[in-house]
Image (cartoon, rainbow, N blue to C red):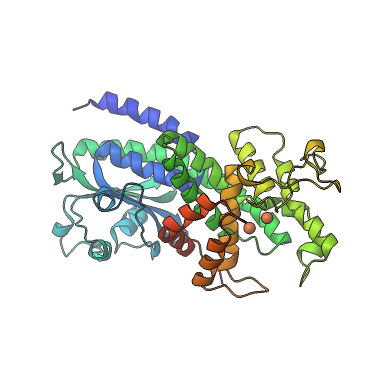
Amino acid sequence: MISEAEQLDTLRELGIELSRVQDLDILMERILSEARRFVNADAGSIYIRDGKSLHFTYTQNDTLQQRLGKHEKLIYATFTMPINEKSIAGYVASTGQALSIGDVEEIPPSSPYHFDRQFDEASHYTTHSMLTIPLKTAKDEILGILQVINARDEANRIGPFSELAEKMMFHFASIAAVALERAQMTRAILLRMIRMAEMRDPKETGAHVNRVGGYAVEIYEQWAHRRNYSKKEIDKDRDILRMAAMLHDVGKVAISDLILKKPGRFNKEEYEIMKQHTVLGARLFQDPKSDFDDAAAEVSLTHHERWDGGGYPGYVNVSTGEALADFSNKDGSPKGKAAEEIPLYGRIVALADVFDALSSARVYKEAWDESKVLETIEKAAGSQFDPEIVEIFFSIIDVMRSIQKRFQDEL
Ligand SMILES: [Fe+2]
Ligand SMILES: [Fe+2]
C-alpha cells in the first residue's frame, strides 16, 4: 500500500501533466482515465454543467472495453439531465457535496436520489460502488461532476471505495477542475475565432468544426496505432490536431462578403479568390509559437489538396500566396501537392471536412443520405483522398456516427 505522502506526490505530478493538455475533450478523457487509475476503478463518467443541466459527456469502462477489439472504441450515447436531487450526479451538483455509495443496490428508498439503471441494462454491466465528486472552480462554482464506478482491490474484486480513496479523489478533483476551467476558456476562445469566421460564412458553424475536429482525431489515432506510436505521443498529437482541425477554414475571415455570401455558383475569378482562404488561414499562424500553431497552419493550408495532385493551393509561398519558383506549372500557377507531399493532418481533415459537409444540410442543399455520402467517399479513395485514410474511416464508421450525434446542428 502506498503512503498518503506518496499519493500526494503522484497527484502533484498529475497536475502538471493535466495542465499541458489544451483541448477540452482530450482533457476530459485524460482526467477520467487518471482518476480511475488513481483509485483503481473499473469505470467512470464525466458530466459537464451547462446552466441548470448536466451533460453526460464522457465515459470509460474497462469491463465493456474488454469485450471489444484492441483499438475499438466504446460507443455510448450522450444525454442531458436537469440538475436536481433525483439523480446521483444531479444530487452532487445541486448540493456541492461528494457522495460515496458502497452499493447502488442498497440505496434506501427514502433517499432523494436513486440509481438510473438504463445504462447498465443497455450495456449488460453491473454497477456496485460509486464515488461521485463535484468539480469546483476556485470560486466554488460547479464545472461538472466526476464519477468513478466499481472500486477493485488487488485481486480485482469489486467493493466499496476506501476512505483514503475518497480523500485522494477530493484532491484530484480540485486539480482536475483547474485544468478543466482553463481548457474551457481555451475552447471558448477557439469557438469565438470560429464564430468570427461563421459570421462571414454561415456554413462554418460551431457544430461543424466540433465534428470535423472529432472525426480527425479518431482517424489520426487509428493511423498512429498502425505505426505503433506510443500512447504519450498519440495523446499529445490528438490534443493539437483537434484544435487545429477546428480552425481549418478560419482564413475565411479575410474573404470578401460579396463572395462568401454569394448565392449560387462562383465564376472562375470568384473561385480563385475563395481558394485563398487556405493561404490566408496559414498566414494567421505564420509566426509559430507552439506545435499547435504549426499544425493549424498545416491544416489551413492543405485541407483542399487532393491525393491525385489536383487540389489547391499547391506549392505556394504562404506570405505572398504566389507559386514557389521550383514548383510551378508552365503558366506560372503553383503545382498541386500530391499523395504524401500533402501533410498527414491535411489529408485527414480533407476527408473529415467533406464527409461532414455532405452529411449536413446547408442553405443550398439538403443533407445527403448516409449511403450516398459513403459511396461518394469510397469512390474518391485514391483520387481526392488518401486511400489509407478512407480505409481507416470505414473501419471506425460507428465512432464517426457517434460524433455526428454528439455535435448536432442547432435547428
Ligand atoms: Fe476550406
Ligand atoms: Fe469546413
Point out the image quarter for the C terminus. bottom right
Q: Position of residue 79 (x, y in %)?
A: 39, 63
* Nearer to me, 271 or 108: 271
* Nearer to me, 360 or 337: 337
Q: Is residue 265 left or right of residue 50?
A: right
Q: Quarter of the image holding residue 271?
A: bottom right
Say which residue appears at 44% left-offset and 30% top-offset: 16
Point out the image quarter for the N terminus. top left
Q: Quarter of the image holding residue 361?
A: bottom right
Q: Is residue 401 left or right of residue 366?
A: left
Q: Is residue 381 left or right of residue 165?
A: right
* Nearer to me, 335 or 271: 335
* Nearer to me, 256 or 225: 225
Q: Position of residue 75 (x, y in %)?
A: 36, 58
Q: Position of residue 152 (x, y in %)?
A: 18, 42
Q: In the figure, 153 relative to 384: above or below?
A: above
Instruction: Using the rendered image of the protein, determine whether residue 148 is visible from the camera's viewpoint.
Output: no
Q: Position of residue 116 (x, y in %)?
A: 26, 64
Say which residue appears at 41% left-offset and 51% top-offset: 144
Q: In the figure, 328 relative to 395: above or below?
A: above
Ligand 1 falls in quadrant: bottom right
Instruction: Count numbered badges in the picture.
Output: 0
Q: Quarter of the image holding residue 293?
A: top right
Say which residue appears at 66% left-offset and 73% top-offset: 363
Q: In the figure, 99 relative to 119: above or below?
A: above
Extreme-front residue of the structure: 330
